[in-house]
Image (cartoon, rainbow, N blue to C red):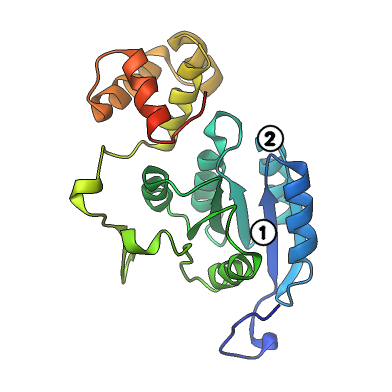
Amino acid sequence: MKIDSPHHLENHEPVRLLIVDRHVLTKNCLAIAFQKVPLVAEVATASKPSEASEIARMFQPSVALVDLALPLNSGFEIAQNLVEFKKSCRVILLDDQFRCPLLQTTIQIGSSGYWTRSSPFDPLAQAVIDASQGKYAFCPEAIPYLTFTSKGPVYTPDQQMLEFEPLTSREMEMLKHVADGRSTKEAATMMEITPKTAENHKYSIMRKFDVNNTAQMLRIAVREGLMRW
């Protein structure tokens, strides 16, 4: 595998890569593949959100490849925590398929890239290297929806394609709880927020979807690929 680089290898900081993926086979295969990439010095893996947080604290990754489909939509939460609390860690999110609303949320939380599982390995590996150097690295499907500025990428799709305002990571988490049949109080307990805040998240989702009941909200979420039943 060839990694494009404008300088010699010794001019680059070795990449410490954290892979967080719910599929053990995928996680292990990616780890084996990345261990063969010249600029990747060490690879750590995790399958659960709780593991990811603890391993990130000890391992101190420079790049994290995070599964967006982790339970309770915690992929966004993990990514946001890494971006906010470890400024030197760049995050690339890995999705099952390309989804515009999730691309927009990816940019909002400050991630460095968004790729899908159908992507070939070599471009994904190059994206990890680019991210480690402070660059933004998005899959080809995402490029038509982005404008790159001096402050980073901006989501700029054709307005006719824009179905609704993107959901925040907390709204995504609330949506999953509702889909799982949990009450607002139960969701609030699991999210460690007040019932009123949880209710506000639910109301905000319905406002963005322009619906007035839970059933309509869930139908739109399934239609837009934000969740599966």
Q: Earlier in the sequence, mark 2 or mark 1?
A: 2
Q: Which mark is residue 50?
A: 2
Q: Which residue is mark 1?
A: 61
Determine the image quadrant of residue 50.
top right
Q: Residue at x 47, y 55 (%)?
A: 111
Instruction: Using the numbered discs, state the Cα–Cα distance from disc 2 to disc 1 in whole angstroms.
Output: 16 Å
- Mark 2 crowdedness (10 Å alpha carbons): few <14, some 14-19, many ≥20: few
| Of residues 173 and 29, the one drawn nearer to the viewer in this rendering | 29
- Depicted 156 relative to depicted 168: above or below: below
Q: Position of residue 74 (x, y in %)?
A: 56, 35
Relative to 171, is 128 above or below? below
Q: Residue at x 59, y 83 (%)?
A: 4
| Image location of residue 145, percent across then percent down | 32, 58
Location of residue 198 with respect to 12 vertically, above or below: above
Tell me the amino acid under the disc marked 2: Ser
Residue 62 horizontal/vertical position (percent)? 63, 63
Residue at 25% from the left image edge and 20% from the top image edge: 211
Q: Who's the residue at 66% across and 42% down the image?
A: 53
Q: Is residue 203 left or right of residue 130?
A: left
